[in-house]
């Protein structure tokens, strides 16, 4: 009889943290910091700071839920625990799967823009979309082929891009010493809160980290630590870079180079070489964001099929870890990527993430006795996210009615999917009923 122990877990604290940082530090900083700076001006760093606080409060709920329900299903598991495995849980879960596809499309679009500009000297939509499609297909294939490689690749990509961004931040602060501050207008209270809604997209990737709960040795300890470590690291980086970018570029320059503001901010600090290096960092950042988000989407698509929120056929394997559901999701995100521009995608993805994460907060509130979470912190988190979401939706409806219509379509479409494709009897009993013993207390 073999005395060999259990096989080593493919993920650890650092690889899970890298997944989170990789999913967060992508389009959020390289494609959207300029958009946020145009809207918030000198208060950009405040918007990123407040967005980070909202993310930390949400991360608290995620950490407590992941510790109580360590499962690859992530958000779908938490919604089932809080609301029961019914229509509401399934609707939000499917909507979240759709927004993951839209988020990958957004990040891939940014990758294609940087790659086309850096290597081809072109901003042609054809080359942008072609390069975006190529990176999506390559990284989805990586996720489907080798789960352990996902964490290793993510750690390498995250390490390189963090070095580049930290160098830019330090050099930028050094260059700003003794020089007059560039004047920027303030956004006002409504404008600031609206920008916080946009900056939340830069943090939303932490939700992908809980999908790795089934792939780590001690999820009750590892996942909470990884979530707070990733959000805190990214929060410090975003605030520093927003100060450097706003302090280095005039309002006119921000408006002109909103999509590549971070790379443009490197020119007055590090010259053309700095621009090239930061642009390469943007490619690494967006690639790792696609990698991390694709991992979460793959895990969730399979989990939704297993729990009955999607037809069983969606869980049928095609190749490696890729299922029919994942393949259909990739086809959908490639279509979305070629239809919407960056700004519209940013508003759609930000609002939908806020809706889904608010639902997780409420689900946590309903199972606080099981998670041992703080009612005060969860209550503050629900209130803060609800205020940001309401003002962001109102602003989007006024300024981008087409994007608002797509957000509504995501919600209605997800509900119709549950109503038409899934019979109530198809939902299996919850794998984690509120009265169940904690995972650590279950017999092996």
Image: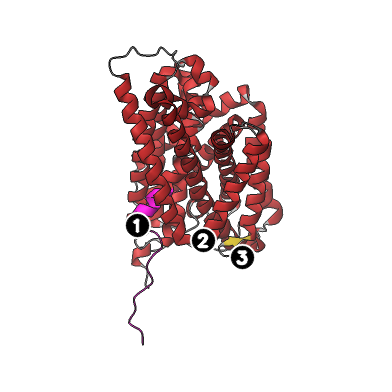
What is the distance, in whole Å, between disc 2 and disc 3 at their CAs?
23 Å
Q: Is residue 49 visible?
A: no
Residue 220's disc number: 1
Q: Nearer the viewer, mark 1 or mark 2?
A: 1
- Residue 255 position within the rendered picture, expressed as x and y whole percent measured from the top left: 53, 19
- The residue depicted at 49 percent of the width and 25 percent of the height is 34
Label 3, secondary structure: give it.
strand
Label located before the other in sequence (3 or 1): 1
Label located before the other in sequence (2 or 3): 3
Left or right: 340 with respect to 432?
A: right
- The residue depicted at 41 percent of the width and 30 percent of the height is 274
The residue most toward the bottom is 1
Residue 302 figure quarter: bottom right
348 or 121: nearer the eye? 121
What is the distance, in whole Å, between disc 1 and disc 2 at their CAs?
20 Å
Sort mark 3 into few (<14), some (14-19) or many (20+) by Cα contacts within 10 Å.
some
Question: Would residue 10 be counted in the magenta stretch?
Answer: yes
Residue tagged by mark 2? 430
- Residue 86 position within the rendered picture, expressed as x and y whole percent measured from the top left: 58, 54
Q: Are marks 3 and 1 in contact (CB under 8 Å)?
A: no
Sort mark 2 into few (<14), some (14-19) or many (20+) by Cα contacts within 10 Å.
some
Q: Main secondary structure of the magenta part?
A: loop
Give the magenta range.
1-19
């Amino acid at each position: 009889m073999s005395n060999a122990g259990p096989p080593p877990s493919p993920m650890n604290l650092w690889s899970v943290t890298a997944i989170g940082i990789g999913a967060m530090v992508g389009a959020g900083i390289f494609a959207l910091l300029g958009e946020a700076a145009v809207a918030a001006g000198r208060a950009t760093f405040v918007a990123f700071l407040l967005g980070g606080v909202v993310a930390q409060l949400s991360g608290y709920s995620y950490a407590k839920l992941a510790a109580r329900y360590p499962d690859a299903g992530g958000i779908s598991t938490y919604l089932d625990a809080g609301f029961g495995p019914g229509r509401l849980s399934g609707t939000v879960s499917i909507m979240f799967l759709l927004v993951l596809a839209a988020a990958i499309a957004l990040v891939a679009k940014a990758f294609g823009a940087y790659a086309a500009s850096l290597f081809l000297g072109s901003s042609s939509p054809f080359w942008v979309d072609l390069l975006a499609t190529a990176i999506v297909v390559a990284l989805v294939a990586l996720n489907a082929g080798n789960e352990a490689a996902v964490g290793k690749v993510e750690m390498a990509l995250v390490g390189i891009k963090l070095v580049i961004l930290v160098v830019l931040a330090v050099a930028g602060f050094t260059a700003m010493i003794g020089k007059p501050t560039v004047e920027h207008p303030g956004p006002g209270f409504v404008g600031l809160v609206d920008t916080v809604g946009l900056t939340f997209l830069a943090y939303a990737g932490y939700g992908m980290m809980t999908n790795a709960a089934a792939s780590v040795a001690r999820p009750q300890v590892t996942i909470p630590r990884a979530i707070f470590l990733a959000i805190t690291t990214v929060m410090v980086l975003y605030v520093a870079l927003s100060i450097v970018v706003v302090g280095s570029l005039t309002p006119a320059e921000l408006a002109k180079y909103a999509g590549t503001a971070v790379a443009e901010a490197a020119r007055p600090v590090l010259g053309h070489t700095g621009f090239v290096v930061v642009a390469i960092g943007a490619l690494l950042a967006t690639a790792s964001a696609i990698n991390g988000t694709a991992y979460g989407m793959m895990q969730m698509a399979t989990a939704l099929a297993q729990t009955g929120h999607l037809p069983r056929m969606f869980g049928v394997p095609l190749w490696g870890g890729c299922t029919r559901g994942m393949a259909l999701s990739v086809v959908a995100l490639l279509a979305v990527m070629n239809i919407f521009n960056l700004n519209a995608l940013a508003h759609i993805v930000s609002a939908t993430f806020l809706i889904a994460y608010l639902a997780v907060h409420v689900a946590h509130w309903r199972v606080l006795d099981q998670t041992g979470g703080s009612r005060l912190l969860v209550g503050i988190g629900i209130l803060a996210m609800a205020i940001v979401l309401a003002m962001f939706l109102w602003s989007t409806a006024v300024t981008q009615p087409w994007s608002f219509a797509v957000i509504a379509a995501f919600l209605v479409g997800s509900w119709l999917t549950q109503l038409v494709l899934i019979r109530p009897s198809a939902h299996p009993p919850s794998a984690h009923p509120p009265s169940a013993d904690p995972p650590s207390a279950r017999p092996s």
